[in-house]
Image (spheres, rainbow, N blue to C red):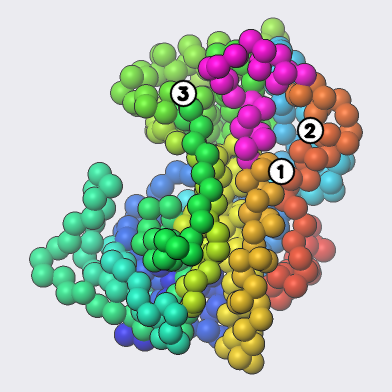
Amino acid sequence: MRTQVGIVGGGPAGLVLSHLLHLRGIESVVIELRGREELESEIRAGVLEQGTVDLLNAAGVGDRMRKEGAVHHGVNLQFDGRRERIDFEDLTGRAITVYGQHEVVKDLIQARLDAGGHILFETAATGLSDLDSEEPKIHFRRDAKLEGGKISFGEDPEEEELVCDHVVGCDGFFGVSRKAIPDGVRREYTRTYPFGWFGILVEGPPSTEELIYNLHERGFALVSTRSPEIQRLYFQCDPEDEVANWPDERIWEEMHARLDTGDWTLREGGIIQKNIVQMRSFVTEPMQYGRLFLAGDAAHIVPPTGAKGMNLALADVRVLARGLADFHESGGTDLLERYTELCLGRVWKASRFSWWMTSMLHRFEEDNAFQHRVQVAELDYVTSSRAAATTLAENYVGLPMDPAFKIPGEDQEQAAH
Ligand code: DHB
């Protein structure tokens, strides 16, 4: 098999890239380990920066997001029994849209299949080769299943080969792509946080119009939403904890203890899903080796606080789509050669923001009484100084995108908002 761009991983980064390339007349094949249903039902974050919304709209995959997504013009920070609002509209003139990542994935898969796009589901990339040649290759096996972190194969699946002009690794932290960059070339920067997030999906009406990020001596809590009927709530937990330790009653007790104020109480509902999210910051440099490019979680992980993960992945892909289009349209390699440099500024700024939000809002075991008071002071400052509130707001809605990486039609979309 041969294609122009071989994409490992069918999450938002791989699918958006494949679609943007298609719009420029460039052919790609997406290799994805999971099945379509599994991919479409995996619950992840749900906050889209305005730049992400603009990109999806301009790529022609924004119809359902515009109808079903909720535009939020601010968020709340709650601490010391007070709730203070950060007004994005006033501070930045921009907004965010709450629309689940798995909904974005559903829209993208549909758009790719409608356009005759090639996605190989339940197919495992087993390795990459010839990355420093003009014909890099992805080795893969079909009929693959991922169970308990292990990949198994059906009867007699042969190893096949996809020969490409370029390979893009969008296969996440555990994928094969990043590890294909030789050890002597690859540098990795990591921070693991001593806590996780326990996430629940709740059937029932919202408790609040806008998100609440809550600092409490018992630990962080977050009130978010997915739709007018489904709420998304999180609370800080031990990263080693297990879902089975948390019957519904215990969850509600903990959430009320952290969130309720004198004049407001969290609204309960039927819990329809529970999961634990690990918290890690991670950046790989460089993001390119020969004709392999890494995008999204394959290159960098942020802790969930601030919901930057998918937004950052799609910002990588904008740069790649433009660089690959230059290559196929005129043979230009300047942007592709500068890919790492063009992405890393944004990557490290988003890493800093996510680390800062995490540090400001979570309970750290050591020296907690001192730390807690410093955190309260910081939240008081961030919500009372216009300068400080603006630094939070402009990072939350998304730092400005270099106009060179806007896709055709995007400015018109923006003007229409
Ligand atoms: C959500 C996740 C986040 O990490 C966040 O900061 C805000 C919202 C969510 O899943 O809704």
Which residue shows up at 46% across the image and 23% down it? Answer: 237
Which residue shows up at 32% across the image and 60% down it? Answer: 33
Q: Which residue is mark 1?
A: 396
**In the rendered image, which quarter is residue 24 located in?**
bottom right
Q: Which residue is mark 3?
A: 237
**In the rendered image, which quarter is residue 89 located in?**
top right
Determine which of the numbered discs, if any, sits on residue 207 in the image.
none
Task: Measure how far apart labels 1 and 2 are at the Cα level.
Answer: 10 Å
Q: Residue furthest top?
A: 262
Residue 404: give x, y in percent of width and height: 75, 72
Of residues 118 and 292, the one drawn nearer to the viewer in this rendering: 292
Query: Which kind of residue does numbered mark 1 sit on?
Result: Tyr
Residue 413: give x, y in percent of width and height: 75, 65
Ligand 1 has an atom within 8 Å of the beta carbon of the residue at disc 2: no
Residue 146: give x, y in percent of width and height: 26, 53
Magenta residues, start to end: 354-377
Q: Which residue is mark 2?
A: 86
Label 1, residues with CA under 10 Å away: few <14, some 14-19, many ≥20: many
Query: Which kind of residue does numbered mark 2 sit on?
Result: Ile
Secondary structure category for the residue under label 2: strand
Q: Is residue 129 visible?
A: yes
Secondary structure category for the residue under label 1: helix
Which residue shows up at 41% across the image and 13% down it? Answer: 249
Q: Can you say which quadrant of the picture contains the N terminus?
A: bottom left
Which tag is nearer the camera, tag 3 or tag 2?
3
Which residue shows up at 43% across the image and 52% down it? Answer: 173
CB within 8 Å, label 3 to label 2: no
Of residues 356 and 113, the one drawn nearer to the viewer in this rendering: 356
Q: Earlier in the sequence, mark 3 or mark 2?
A: 2
